[in-house]
Each structure stands twice: as C-alpha cells, then as structure tokens.
Amino acid sequence: MKKFLVLFMAVLIALLPIVGMAEGVSLTMGSWRADDVEQMNNLLSIYKEKTGVDITFQPTNPSDYNATLNLQLEGGTGPDLMYSRSYATGLELFNAGHAGDCTDIPGLHENFTELNLAPWATEDGKMFAVPFAAVSHGVYYNKDVFAANNIEIPATFEELLAACETLKTAGITPFANGVAEEWDILECFFLGMLPNYVGGAENRAKYESGELKMNDENFVAALGDIGKMAPYLPTGFEAVTYNDSQILFATGKAAMFMDGSWTSGTYGDVEFEWGVFALPAPEGKATAICFHPDLAITYNTATAHPDECKAFLEWLCSEEGVTAAVANLPAGYYPLSNFSVTFTDEHANEFLALNEGKETDARFVWPTLMDLYAPMNQAVIQVLKGAMTAQEAGDSIVAAFDALQ
C-alpha cells in the first residue's frame, strides 16, 4: 500500500505541469469577421470552460485582413490562432512558414471528406488549416415589395432584368449593390453569377490551365450581363459602400441585394418579410450556385503555445466542437465536417436549400487565380461604369493572365 501511494504521488506530481500547461494559458485569434465578435466569444467561452484556455478574438476589417496579418506575422506580433482563407491565399502563409502544419491533428481526416479538406491542402497532401465553414451566394429579396408589384421569383436572367425594370418604373431601386469598396461587387455579385455562364469546377480548371480563355463567348456574356445591372443599382452606385448596401436593403429602399449568406443574420429585425433565391442563369443555361469553402483556422508557427493551439484545433474537428460552432456561428455559415447538424434559422436553411439539384463551385479565382483578383475586379467595375465593353474587359483579364505565365 505504501509503495502504491508513493507511486501514485509520483505520477500525480509528474502530471501537474501538464494539467497546468493549459490552465491559465491565454491565446489570441486573428480573423476578418468583425461582425462575429459576440458569437465567437460565446464559442470560445465554451472552450475556456472546458479547458481553462482563454482565447481572445481579435478581428480585423475584412479588406485589411490579409495585409494586416502579414505585417503582424513578419513583425513577430501575429496571433496564436488565425483564420485561414482557402486555396492560394491560405497556402501562401503556409509556404512562408507562418501557418502551422495541421496534417496530424486528430479527427481531421476522419471527420472531413477529402473534397472539403482540399481547399486547405497542399499538392503533397499536407493540411495547413482545419476547415471551419462554407458560405453561399444568392439574391436577398423583399417579399413584400415583390408581392406589391406582382413579381415572381425570376427563373432566368432575362426574367430578372424584367423584374428590375418593373421595380425601377415603380420608383424602387432594384439592387442595393455598389462598388465603392470594390471587393463585394466582384466576390458577391460577379463571382456569384459566373458559374451560370462558365460552368463549375471542371470548366474552371480549363480556364486555369489556359485551355479556355477569359474572353471567350461565355465569359464575355457574364461580363455583359453584369453590365446590364448598372441601371438597376442605386443612383450614384460608384460611391455606395457595402455597409450602405446593407442599409438600403434593410430599410426597404432597395428590393434586392446580391450578397453572401454570411449577412443573413443582419436582417433579423427588419420590418418586412424577406427571402433568398439563386441568381438565375440566362435562358438555355442551368442555374448554378457559388458555394464557397470560406474559412478555416490554423495556428501561428511562432506561437509560444503550439500544444494548446493544436488542442483547440482538435476540438474543432470533434463532434462536440462542431456542435458548439453550429450553435454559435452566425446564420449563413455552414460547417464542412461529416457530422449531421440542424439549423434553427429558417434563412440559413433557405440558403442551403439553393444548392439542391444544382452544380456548385467555389469563387472562380480562389483555387489558383488569385493574382487575377484585382484585374478582374477592375474589369467588372469598368463595365458597370460604362468605361469598358464586355469584350474589352475580357481582353484585359486575358492580358493580365498572359502576363503571369
């Protein structure tokens, strides 16, 4: 008995540093989701209660995140944990030695499909982040305004234009979107509609390789059709910010808003009924959905607490962690794990239902063409402003692509 007690005490003393390793540890988490502070704090408080590890959520304005994070990492002040964008942008942080190797995080390969791991995987199969959520793209619409003007959900792009004309004639701004902040007109609108014209992942790969050109008939048709939206955007849309767009829709001053599922929680207390529909393809083409693997979480290789960071990522791979995330993330974020989850928000389910029976793909430039983000963004804006024809815009994108080869 005495020997047993001595052995027990020795084991207990040996374990004390391990127990204390997590207890009282403070970590930071970088993110581009400044709108999610309350929800993420709720999620992180669950983890703190479970482990004693305190994680402080430190978001940055979305358009500033990449540059700010890179400056922090290069300067040695980066967060312990950080949101990782999918595909090339996230891979850059890994190749630069900043994002940790998550390949061996327990549960990662067991609880996610290879398809959902791929946006954060290297060519040789290493994982540089743990998948966290996907988002969808669609058209928010004011059901009351549609009903008052006898407008049905359009089944084709031509019907959408007709609906816009009806609204404009009635003195109602059809779409809330502007171009002042630039990113949203590309990411939310153009890349949201592009699969309707060029197809999904199989065809996207042909554009990536150069087999298909971004000034071909289909691509130019997409540029031409977004140009047709200019008369139906707010007056002075050149100066309308993303926040302005949200307000225009929320106050009923615009009937529609082409946006992502991530803002569906913004309209929880508006004074009208609203819903979402897929931005329809032109007549003769099949409507597709941009369903984008949006964010993952990784750890900073320079963190002083790598074990605690990896333990948190392991928790995010578990059913307990996924369940907690689903309960606390904003509506419109969809977990990528294999676990069955239930959404209580009707609009979250409505967005997800848009995928049914349709081809889906990620945002066109994300997998391998991020260097074309800025040229494509400017091409879209110039078409909307009437400074370029659709063909000229397509030619400018091809010139930018050729310059990269």
Image (cartoon, grey):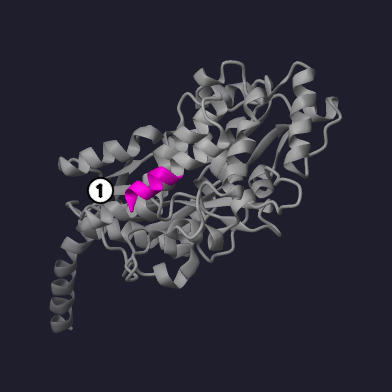
Q: Say which quarter of the image contains residue 169.
A: top right
The answer to whether any part of residue 28 appears in the image is yes
Residue 185 at x, y percent in the picture: 52, 33
Residue 117 at x, y percent in the picture: 43, 64
Q: Main secondary structure of the magenta part?
A: helix
Mark 1 surroundings: few (<14), some (14-19) or many (≥20) residues within 10 A: many
Q: Say which quarter of the image contains residue 176.
A: top right
Residue 239 or residue 259, whichever sits in front: 239
Residue 371 or residue 318, whichever sits in front: 371
The answer to whether any part of residue 372 appears in the image is no
- What residue is rendered at 25% in x and 44% in y? 79
Does the magenta segment cover residue 129?
no
Q: Is residue 38 left or right of residue 24?
A: right
Residue 60 at x, y percent in the picture: 35, 34
What span is colored magenta in the figure?
398-405
Q: Is residue 79 left or right of residue 75?
A: right
Q: Quadrant of the N terminus?
A: bottom left
Q: Which residue is mark 1?
A: 80
Q: Residue furthest right?
A: 150
